Image (spheres, rainbow, N blue to C red):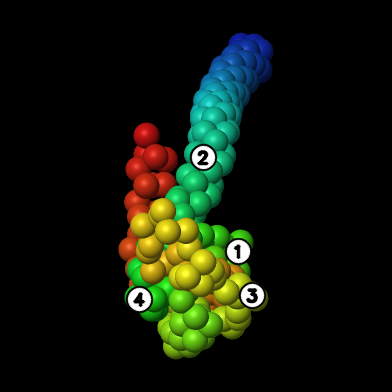
Amino acid sequence: MAKINLLPWRDELREKRKKQFITASVGVAFLGALLVGATWFFYDQKLSDQEQANQLIVSTNQNLDQQLKSLDGLQEKRNQIIERMKLIQGLQSQRPIAVRLIDELARVTPTNVYITRFTRSGDKFMFEGRADSPNAVAEFLRNLEASSWYRNAFMNSFIAGVEQSQIQKSVVPRPEDGYGTFVVTADLDEPSIQAVAVVQPEVAAENVVEVSTSEVAQ
């Protein structure tokens, strides 16, 4: 004989399914909120890291700007030191030339000729002096031309001196009192200057680098 269930089982099933739906909805909502929170935290952390990286870049750029400004000042100072060293180097290169010119002049001057005035204007020289005869001046010119430091020697003038018989008797006679006066011009020989200038070029350049580097380091 078949059994018939007359209890309201449909209502109970409906309530059970309703509770299951509510439970599932709450679980899904909780998982969704959890996922949203985790996503927000992740991107917030990335944003914070990016802001820190940006701040680091800004501070690094500021430091680099300051270093560049200091380097600009050092470069200018280095250029000034190099210019000063070039000036000193030029003066030092001219100093041995002047000494050699005087030494060479003493070597080429004959015994019966003496110089009373020696002037220089650039690469031009003028010698004023006294000699016992034009032949002595001619010998002086030949010696200048044969020298490696002078060229284009030329006698501008020669004025004969006073005869020994015309010198006053009250004055103690000297041989040079009867000498004539002369004016001679000559030019500086360029190859000799270049030879002196290249004697120590590497040492001079090394000194410039050394001094400029030490000054920049300070």
Name the mark nearer the viewer: 1 or 4: 4
Along the line of sight, which residue is nearer the eye, 11 or 196? 196
Query: Looking at the rendered structure, which numbered label has been put on residue 111?
Result: 4
Alpha carbons under labels 1 and 4: distance apart: 28 Å
Judging by the rendered image, the residue that carries numbered circle 3 is 157
Helix or strand or loop: what does disc 1 sit on?
A: loop
Name the mark nearer the viewer: 2 or 3: 3
Judging by the rendered image, the residue that carries numbered circle 2 is 77
Instruction: Report the side of 171 relative to 156 (left or right).
Output: left
Q: Earlier in the sequence, mark 2 or mark 3?
A: 2
Residue furthest to the front: 169
Name the mark nearer the viewer: 1 or 2: 1
Instruction: Report the side of 175 relative to 76 (left or right).
Output: left
Q: How many marks?
A: 4
Judging by the rendered image, the residue that carries numbered circle 1 is 122
Name the mark nearer the viewer: 2 or 4: 4
Residue 118 at what x, y percent from top left? 51, 62
Residue 76 at what x, y percent from top left? 56, 41
Q: Earlier in the sequence, mark 1 or mark 3?
A: 1
Q: Quadrant of the N terminus?
A: top right
Q: Residue at x 49, y 46 (%)?
A: 84
Along the line of sight, which residue is nearer the eye, 170 or 74? 170
Three-letter code for the amino acid on which mark 4 is drawn? Thr
- Would you call the spot at circle 2 few (<14 residues within 10 Å), some (14-19), or many (20 or more)? some
Three-letter code for the amino acid on which mark 1 is drawn? Gly
